[in-house]
Image (cartoon, rainbow, N blue to C red):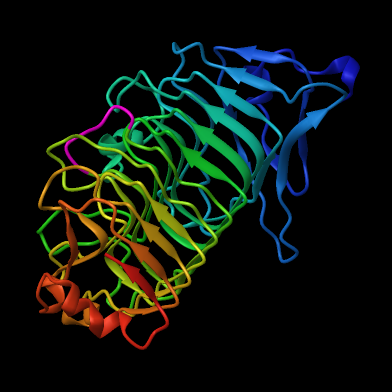
Amino acid sequence: MTQGTACQTLAKASSFTYSGNDRLLLKAGDTWTNETLTLVGESWHAGGAQITVTSYGVGARPLLDGTHTTDAAIQFQPTTFWRAGWAIDGIDIRDYRVVGVYAYTTSGYARGLTLRNMDITDIYGGGVTSNATPGYQNLPYVAVWAPHGVLTYKVSDIEFDNLSITGCGSPGNVIGYSNLYIHDSEFNTGRHGGMWVSLATGYEWGTGTVQDLTRSLQSRTALIERCAFNGNGTVGQDWGIAGLQVNGGVDVTIRDCDMSGNLDTASSPDGVGLDLEGATVNARVEDCTMTNNRGDGAFLFNNTWGVPGLVQSGATFINNTIANNGLKNQNSTCAFIRIAGTAPQNASTTLTGNTVSCGATQETFNELSGAGLTNSIAAITRFVNGGGNTVCP
């Protein structure tokens, strides 16, 4: 196909099946209004081949505009186990009702998704029962954070690079991941929450069943660096708001990120900068900033979803700046760190070289009930003293 025979609509582009190193090119400077691009086809070979959606020509990046009347901008559903292999580069999306980019599979796990150089803005206005996006209504917790800038379900080998996702119901949800790399991106001003990364692909609270989640947790690594998760919770809700929330994972590293100014409703226990929850093992948080959050600076919670044998442990905080959190006048928030749940392994948390200050004097400085400790500054000496931390309560 040439420029002279180019498709005129996304519906036409959606009628093809792509494979190998195919490229779908949208003309720079053009806008597609009230259209959905449905990607059909798969690629992921030994060399890591990907089908690429990008632009051609000179001008502004191609724009998909849903005018708040169309549900989804870009969606695909791989059907072959461990096959996906799509890269979307330099396409902007705005004003869809339900989701900007949606990748979903029920056939094992899909593999290989890259989103790069994209602005996704103002995805809101629809709900989980008002869209035609396949399977969306049945995904776990999707109603809590919908609509989404980006939503992936059971996709591994994910990279998000230079994304700006703002003003959505939730900037991003990654559910059921393996090998996740998010860098040089911003996930800000979400109406409900920020970025939610979850190991579990489906569970019912307290029933003792978690799909695709073994007690060994396998290898579900993630690296998140040089990102901003700020000012989320602009319209508030009863719970679930954090700048960045990680629900399960092994060897999760969060480096040089800003998780500040996150909001929530007055009655909610959330609104935190960073939430490590579920069964997150060996999380490492370094060179990050958590300031001016209405809730805790950091929250560690051994939420095992009712599954015996799941244990959160081994969090490490190194050289972070945590200041002036717990801004709402509630006893349930802390200026520094809150460790809760039932696992004594959370007591293995270590803090080294952090700068911590308490600007909201009405709040508890720390809460360590889950670790079997008392709610006092003295109790935190178990973590702080001898670690080179600067504490200014």
Q: Picture quarter containing residue 112?
A: bottom right
**Region of the chain picked out in magenta, as a range:** 234-239
* Residue 253 picture location, percent across and down: 49, 68
Vertical placement of 78 versus 91: above or below? Answer: below
* Residue 116 picture location, percent across and down: 66, 43
Q: Is residue 301 magenta?
A: no
Vertical placement of 266 versus 322: above or below? Answer: above
Q: Residue at x 29, y 78 (%)?
A: 313
Q: Inspect this view and state whether residue 48 appears.
A: yes
Magenta highlight: main SS: loop
* Residue 349 picture location, percent across and down: 30, 79
Q: Residue at x 46, y 38 (%)?
A: 188
* Residue 225 picture location, percent across and down: 56, 59
Vertical placement of 356 versus 158: above or below? Answer: below
- Residue nearest the viewer, comparing 192 with 298: 298
Number of labelled discs? 0
Is residue 2 found left or right of 232 in the rendered image? right
Is residue 285 found left or right of 193 in the rendered image? right
